[in-house]
Amino acid sequence: MKIIVLSAALSAALIAVPALAQPLTVVQNHRANVFGVVQAGPQVRPVDVTQTGQANVAGVVQAGAAPRSTIKQTGRSNTALVTQFESRVVSVGRSHMP
């Protein structure tokens, strides 16, 4: 039963964040901590997660220009997943066909 509750909490904690300039800072200080964030866009926000509990789970997925994230966990059971895709927009001039 605890695994089902943890899975529901993880899916409820996923946040789709629009691209903003200020950093996203999260501090969790509970017995069990779960946090997840998904970002996509030309200016993804830096993410800083600090979790202090017996069980900690954090996930960060970023796709955009200059993704950055930091996860700090202290506890008996810690799990972290960071997936980042950096994309740069290259301006393409006019193309002429002969």
Image (cartoon, rainbow, N blue to C red):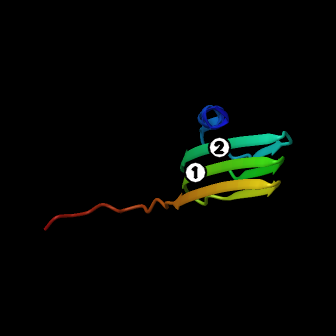
Mark 1 or mark 2: name the one nearer the start of the chain.
Answer: 2
Residue type, label 2: Gly
Residue 61 is tagged as: 1
Task: Check if mark 1's residue and mark 2's residue have beta carbons within 8 Å.
Answer: yes
In the rendered image, residue 4, in percent from the top left (x then y), is placed at 60, 33
| Label 1 – label 2 distance at C-alpha | 8 Å
Along the horizontal axis of the image, is 46 left or right of 97?
right
Residue 52 in the image: above or below residue 93: above
Residue 44 can be seen in this image: no
Along the horizontal axis of the image, is 97 left or right of 3?
left
Residue 82 can be seen in this image: yes
Circle 2 residue: 36
In the rendered image, residue 83, in percent from the top left (x then y), is placed at 56, 57
Residue 71 in the image: above or below residue 28: below
Name of the residue lying farthest toward the bottom:
98
Residue 68 in the image: above or below residue 26: below
In the rendered image, residue 1, in percent from the top left (x then y), is placed at 64, 32
Q: Which structural element holds mark 2?
A: strand
Along the horizontal axis of the image, is 68 left or right of 64?
right
